[in-house]
């Protein structure tokens, strides 16, 4: 970041700190010999309410609740997203994909039946279990389940501001993602990255075989 502005990237107390998105980082070498990121991916699962209810398992300190209040584990994803956004500050695209699973990321109401036949409703607008707003809030409130790889530029008075937004994907009902569906999303985002990098990969793309 200091190459963009000398005041940026100056504060770091833990010199050996690092990030490691669980889906890894894919890069390509451009025509100038520089490595450029084309895909960063992660899958985060939080909230076992659906599984617990189906098994008839009660939760809480007294084991008398159907639903466990959501934790803050997903907020660890913020660090990785922020660090990659800092690293890609000068880029016009941001290929970060985050797949969300579990009852803490519902976008629709779900009714789950216990083994004894009792039905438990999980409301997607419940502050006790839903944590998806904590991610969308850090993502400018932009849409989920959409490829946001190409940065959005907004006009504020006379200034243009470029927004780096992660592409957040959720099944909506707590289900796990299939490998096939994740690959489809990741391929779409990676292709967008390559399109944005087209002029810097032109020689390689047009090189005769």
Image (spheres, grey):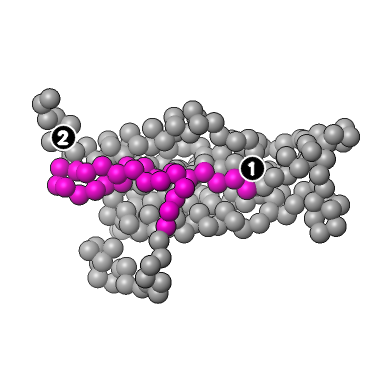
Q: Is residue 115 magenta?
A: no
Residue at (31%, 39%) from the top-left corner? 193
Foreground residue among 133 and 15: 15
Residue 108 as seen in the image, left or right of residue 149: right
Image position, residue 75 (x, y; %): 55, 57
Residue with the most extreme top position: 209
Residue at (24%, 62%) from the top-left corner? 4
Q: Is residue 31 magenta?
A: yes
Which span of residues is magenta-colored?
19-46
Image position, residue 44 (x, y; %): 55, 46
Q: Indicate the quadrant containing the N terminus: top left, top right, bottom left or bottom right.
A: bottom left
Image position, residue 76 (x, y; %): 53, 57
- CA distance separating discs 2 and 1: 42 Å
Image position, residue 194 (x, y; %): 28, 37
Residue under circle 2? 204
Residue at (43%, 53%) from the top-left corner? 20
What secondary structure is found at the residue carrying circle 1?
A: loop
Residue under circle 1? 102
Sequence-first tag of 2 and 1: 1
Residue 143 as seen in the image, left or right of residue 201: right
Q: Residues within 10 Å of mark 2 (few under 14, many from 20)?
A: few
């Amino acid at each position: 970041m200091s190459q963009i502005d000398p005041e940026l990237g100056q504060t770091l107390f833990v010199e050996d700190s690092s990030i490691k998105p669980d889906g890894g980082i894919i890069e390509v070498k451009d025509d100038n010999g520089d490595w450029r990121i084309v895909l960063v991916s992660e899958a985060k699962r939080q909230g076992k309410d659906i599984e617990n209810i189906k098994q008839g398992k009660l939760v809480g300190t007294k084991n008398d609740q159907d639903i466990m209040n959501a934790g803050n584990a997903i907020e660890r994803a913020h660090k990785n997203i922020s660090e990659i956004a800092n690293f890609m500050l000068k880029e016009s695209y941001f290929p970060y994909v985050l797949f969300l699973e579990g009852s803490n990321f519902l976008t629709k109401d779900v009714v789950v039946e216990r083994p004894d036949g009792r039905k438990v409703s999980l409301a997607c607008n419940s502050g006790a279990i839903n944590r998806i707003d904590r991610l969308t809030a850090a993502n400018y409130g932009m849409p989920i389940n959409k490829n946001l790889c190409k940065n959005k530029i907004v006009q504020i008075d006379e200034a243009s501001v470029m927004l780096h937004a992660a592409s957040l994907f959720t099944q909506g009902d707590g289900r796990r993602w299939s490998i096939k569906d994740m690959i489809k999303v990741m391929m779409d985002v990676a292709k967008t990255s390559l399109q944005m990098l087209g002029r810097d990969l032109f020689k390689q793309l047009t090189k005769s075989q």
